[in-house]
Every structure is written in structure tokens, then in C-alpha cells.
Image: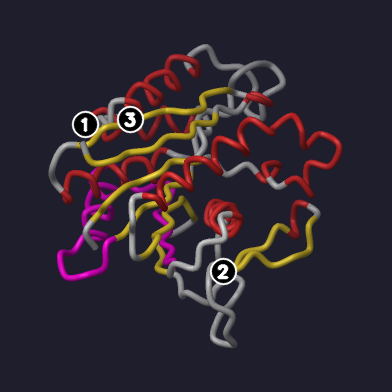
Amino acid sequence: MPLVAAAVCPHPPLIVPELAGAAAPELDDLRAAADAAVARLLAAGPEAVLLVGAGPETVRFNAADWGSLRGFGLDRPVRLWKISCSGAERLPLSLTVGAWLLNRSGTELPRLARSVAHDATPAECAAFGASLIADDDPRVALLVLGDGSACRGVKAPGYDDPRAEAYDEGVAVALAGADADALLGLDPGLSAQLRVAGRAPWQALAGAARAAGGDWRGDVSYQDAPYGVAYFVANWERA
């Protein structure tokens, strides 16, 4: 699939207003940034959108599969694309939130989804990303889902870790610079200790951009750590 553009968004369940309830306005800025990043992704003129996020295993999903936020209090399916009896509730959280974001855009483009195992090595992630690119397939845009560290402060899910802020700043710099080498250099062990959910998908993005070739430019439109978890919204486009 010739890669025309990519967007990076986080996947906190609370980005869905119905789940956040009265606290929904606290993530208005994140929601707006994610919506704008998806709109910018679609403006690149892809013929299909491929969602990439972390999951327990590396899996290719069907266009009719869906995800659920039932475990977070919202009993409503989130469709990837088509409605068909061949689909199943299979999407991990990352791709479920990604599908929700894409559905908000109103696009009717075909969409595909792949999960990359959260414990895949950097080399495996790069190879996975490269495997997504083939010259004889439609022009594709990647929507990459992943959160940063969950250790930003004593109220964070992973409590406070003094290494977290520097880690997240390194990710932000790499995304802003479309720096595939820096993303592939993220350490899996440290990432796991900091409860980073985006390491494998970001490294898959790096592998895809490398395989696609050419020069890329990046832009980070959101970087913050509400609730002690680092979130990034970014776009990668052809330079």
C-alpha cells in the first residue's frame, strides 16, 4: 500500500464523551486535536485508511469486525467499517478508539485494521510496518494509535516515575521530526516499565515510513499528560 500520510492519536477510553460524563470537557482539547489530525489525514487523498494499534497479538482484522467499550460502561458496538454477519467483536481497545475517531469524521473510505503485539521487538515492529506497504495496493493513510507513559505523577495509573517525562519528551521530538530512527530506538524494557501503550505501533509507523521511502515531515499538535498519562497527536506527511 503506497503510504501517503499518517496520523498518531492516543486511545484513552475517556476521549469518548459518553464515558467521561461530566468530566468530558477536560479532554475537549485532546478530542479537537484528534479530530483535526484525522481530517488532515483524510485531506492527503488516501483511497483507504489503515488503523494500527497495540494488542495482545499481531492480528489482521476483517472490515466487518467491531470493538466494544462495554468494560468501561458504554454498551454500544464500535464498528470498524462494514456491517456483516461475518464480523465479530475482536478489536482491542486501541483499534476500538481508533475506529470511533475515524467514524466521527464521517468518511466513507474503506478502512482496515491491524494490531501489533505490544511485546514485539523493535525489529519485529519495523518488519510489520514494512509489510503494510506494497506498490500494487491502493494509496493508504495510517491512523496509528498509542499512549505514552502512564507514570506522570503520584496519581498516574503507574504512579510516579522520574524517567517518564524524559521518555515522553523524546517521543514528542521524534514524532515532530518524523524521526524513524529515534522511534525504533525506544527501549521495550523501559517502555514496559513506564506502561507505554504506543511503543510497538510507533515503531510500526517508523518501519512503514522507511519502507515507503522519501522524506517525511512531522507535526505534533497536542502533547500533555492529563490523569498522569502522556498523550500525543501528530501528523506525518510527505516533505
Locate residue 3, reporting x and y percent.
25, 54
Asked whether, in this view, residue 103 is left or right of residue 177, the answer is right
Asked whether, in this view, residue 96 is left or right of residue 136, the answer is right
Pointer 1 local density, CA inside 10 Å: few below 14, some 14–19, many at least 20 = few
Locate residue 221, reporting x and y percent.
47, 28
Locate residue 191, reporting x and y percent.
43, 31
Kind of residue sitting beneath label 1: Asp
Kind of residue sitting beneath label 2: Arg
Residue drawn at x 40%, y 48% as measured from the top left: 41
Asked whether, in this view, residue 174 is left or right of residue 134, the answer is right
C-alpha gap between disc 1 and disc 3: 9 Å
- Residue at image mark 2: 90
Locate residue 104, reporting x and y percent.
61, 55
Q: Which residue reaches farthest bottom?
A: 85
- Taking the magenta stretch, the answer to whether it contains residue 203 is no
Tag shown at residue 8: none
Q: In this view, does 189 lie above or below 96?
A: above
- Residue at image mark 3: 186
Check if mark 2's residue and mark 3's residue have beta carbons within 8 Å: no
Residue drawn at x 33%, y 30% as measured from the top left: 186
**Marks 2 and 3, the one that precedes in the sequence:** 2
- Find numbered disc 2 in the image and state the secondary structure of the residue it sits on: loop
- Find numbered disc 1 in the image and state the secondary structure of the residue it sits on: helix
Pointer 3 local density, CA inside 10 Å: few below 14, some 14–19, many at least 20 = some
Tag shown at residue 181: 1
Which range of residues does the magenta coloring cover?
A: 111-139
C-alpha gap between disc 2 and disc 3: 28 Å
Asked whether, in this view, residue 82 is left or right of residue 16, the answer is left
- Taking the magenta stretch, the answer to whether it contains residue 136 is yes
- Find numbered disc 3 in the image and state the secondary structure of the residue it sits on: loop
Q: How is the image coloured?
A: secondary structure
